[in-house]
Image (cartoon, helix red, strand yellow):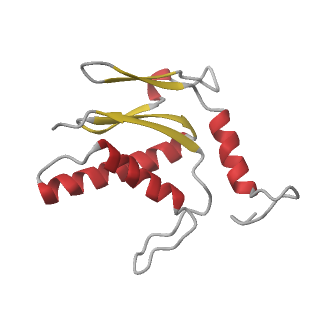
Amino acid sequence: RGVNTFSPEGRIFQIEYAFEAVKLGATALGMKTNEGVILAVEKKLPSRLMDPTSVEKIMEIDYHVGCASSGIAGDAKTLADHARVESQQHKFSFNEPLTVEAVTQSIADLAIHFGEGSEGKKEKPMSRPYGVSLLVAGVDVD
């Protein structure tokens, strides 16, 4: 089905599928403390044959920003990799770390434009919505 195929109720099927993928994901939570932030994720293993150490639900984006994911692991890795590149490019260009809000905005910009093509770029657009929810947390150094 195409990205813009509507259900009889008027909703877009691909977005409904992405919401279902997130619902089936693990619980993720974050806590703010005086010293920083804490991220925690429940690891649900679909099979006993899977190695628990191979499931990565908490990822470091930069030394001061991390994220916890729930949903499709491949989509989480794609979004986290994008955030890492944006953070490193900013650090290289301006010699300062990217703020947590700017990292979050970068991820949101990529996720919201999933079906749009990039003018002049060779990369293909994502053909479906990302089926992942990210909890981004960090500490801005002032």
Q: Is residue 110 left or right of residue 138?
A: right
Q: Is residue 48 left or right of residue 43?
A: right
**If the image is split into quadrants, where does the N terminus sit?**
bottom right
Q: Is residue 76 above or below residue 112?
A: above
Q: Is residue 7 left or right of residue 116?
A: right
Report the number of numbered marks.
0
Tell me residue 52's x, y (percent).
49, 22
Q: Is residue 72 above or below residue 120?
A: above
Tell me residue 94's x, y (percent).
13, 57
Tell me residue 102's x, y (percent).
32, 50
**Residue shown at 44%/70% (left/top)?**
123
Q: Is residue 21 left or right of residue 12?
A: left
Q: Is residue 120 above or below residue 80?
A: below
Could you say which quadrant of the image residue 4 lies in? bottom right
Query: From this viewpoint, which residue is outermost toward the right?
Result: 8
**Residue shown at 50%/23% (left/top)?**
51
Could you say which quadrant of the image residue 11 lies in? bottom right
**Residue shown at 42%/51% (left/top)?**
107
Query: From this viewpoint, which residue is outermost toward the bottom?
Result: 120
Query: From this viewpoint, which residue is outermost toward the left?
Result: 95
Q: Is residue 3 above or below residue 42?
A: below
**If the image is split into quadrants, where does the C terminus sit?**
top left
Tell me residue 38's x, y (percent).
36, 22
**Residue shown at 38%/54% (left/top)?**
106
